[in-house]
Amino acid sequence: MMPVAWIPSLMQKLTQGQQQIPVEGATVRQVVDALEALSPGFKARIVEDERIRTEIAVAVDGEVVTSGLRAKVGPQSEVHFLPALAGG
């Protein structure tokens, strides 16, 4: 089994329209690096200055992670990259 990354619709042009992509990784950083290898340009949309961009939320198995790129990912995890909702 491999974690499955869920790609938001606004980023699916980087993944040739794929919404779900199984990737290797035990941390969010490894998942992002694996997605970058498959879809160059993906990491720049998610990561800035070695941190998750403030406008992106990452959820692992339905829980928004607070540990960013260091968050653990299990072999059957679902990793969702979500545009963070801004108040206004």
Image (cartoon, helix red, strand yellow):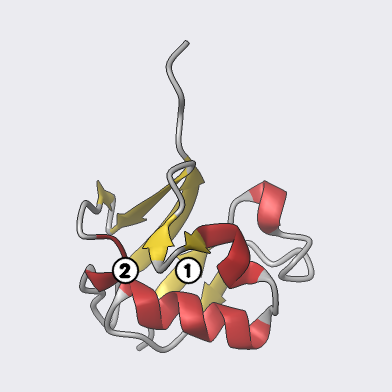
Give amino acid for label 2: Leu
Q: Nearer the viewer, residue 53 or 61?
A: 53
Q: Nearer the viewer, residue 18 or 67?
A: 67
- Residue 71 vertical position relative to residue 10 in the rendered view, above or below: below
Based on the displayed image, in which of its 4 quarters is residue 29 positioned?
bottom left
- Residue 33 vertical position relative to residue 78 in the rendered view, above or below: below
Secondary element at tag 2: helix
Answer left or right for 6 relative to 9. left
Q: Residues within 10 Å of mark 2 (few under 14, many from 20)?
A: some
- The residue drawn where x is 28% and y is 78% is 27
Earlier-in-chain disc, 1 versus 2: 1
Q: Position of residue 1 (x, y in %)?
A: 35, 88
Residue ID for mark 2: 69
- The residue drawn where x is 24% and y is 53% is 65
Rendered image: mark on residue 5: 1
- The residue drawn where x is 44% and y is 64% is 49
- The residue drawn where x is 48% and y is 68% is 5
Residue with the most extreme top position: 88
Answer left or right for 4 relative to 63. right
Secondary element at tag 1: strand
Q: Nearer the viewer, residue 84 or 19?
A: 84
Task: Report the Cα–Cα distance between label 1 and label 2.
Answer: 14 Å
Based on the displayed image, in which of its 4 quarters is residue 38 positioned?
bottom right
Based on the displayed image, in which of its 4 quarters is residue 70 positioned?
bottom left
Q: Position of residue 33 (x, y in %)?
A: 49, 82
Q: Are marks 1 and 2 in contact (CB under 8 Å)?
A: no
- Residue 86 vertical position relative to residue 18 in the rendered view, above or below: above
Rendered image: mark on residue 84: none
Q: Position of residue 13 (x, y in %)?
A: 78, 61
Q: Position of residue 8 (x, y in %)?
A: 60, 51
Give amino acid for label 1: Ala
- Residue 49 vertical position relative to residue 63 in the rendered view, above or below: below
